[in-house]
Image (tube, helix red, strand yellow):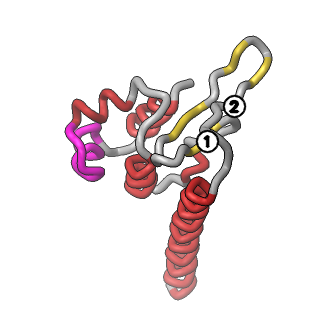
């Protein structure tokens, strides 16, 4: 499944409209519709979509996903029964920094969600 199709499904399952998400991430609805048909797009958009939908980045990223130096998401296509990785010229410092940023953002998101849940538990216990 295309990365864009996963994004489309997640938005469809959310209470938000495509127009709402497009405005939130700073693009036009037409550009978001174009993303739905792509297997690669800028990571900054994916991170903003994850934040708005309160989903971890790993929800969209699966086996065979890589991030190029330009910040593009690229997903490997399954050919027969073999998975082939999309090559972006090896892992260099820039690519590792991008991956680290993604992990740090996901961790911060999860920590905030945990904090919110703990506060909710305390409120419910006090009643």
- Residue 28, x across and y down, in percent: 20, 39
Give the mark, 2 or 1, whose residue is nearer the N terminus: 1
Which residues are the magenta region? 17-28
From the viewer's perspective, is 120 left or right of 61? left
> Within the image, what quadrant is residue 115 found in?
bottom right
Q: Secondary structure at mark 1?
A: strand
Q: Is residue 86 above or below residue 70?
A: above
The reply to whether callout 2 and callout 1 are in contact (CB within 8 Å) is yes
Determine the residue positioned at 65% across, 39% down.
62
Q: Is residue 120 above or below residue 56?
A: below
> Within the image, what quadrant is residue 106 found in?
bottom right
Determine the residue positioned at 40% across, 23% down.
37
The residue that disc 2 covers is 85
Q: Is residue 101 above or below residue 124?
A: above
- Residue 95, x across and y down, in percent: 58, 53
Q: Nearer the viewer, residue 84 or 25?
A: 84
From the viewer's perspective, is 35 left or right of 74? left
- Residue 42, x across and y down, in percent: 41, 44
Q: Is residue 110 magenta?
A: no
């Amino acid at each position: 499944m295309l990365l864009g199709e996963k994004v489309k499904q997640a938005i469809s399952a959310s209470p938000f409209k495509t127009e709402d998400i497009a405005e939130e991430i700073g693009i036009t609805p037409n550009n978001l519709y174009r993303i739905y048909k792509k297997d690669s797009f800028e990571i900054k958009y994916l991170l903003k979509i994850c934040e708005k939908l309160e989903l971890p980045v790993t929800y969209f990223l699966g086996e065979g996903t890589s991030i190029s130096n330009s910040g593009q998401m690229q997903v490997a296509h399954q050919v027969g029964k073999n998975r082939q990785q999309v090559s972006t010229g090896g892992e260099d410092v820039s690519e590792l920094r991008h991956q680290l940023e993604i992990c740090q953002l996901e961790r911060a998101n999860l920590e905030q969600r945990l904090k919110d849940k703990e506060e909710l538990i305390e409120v419910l216990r006090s009643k």
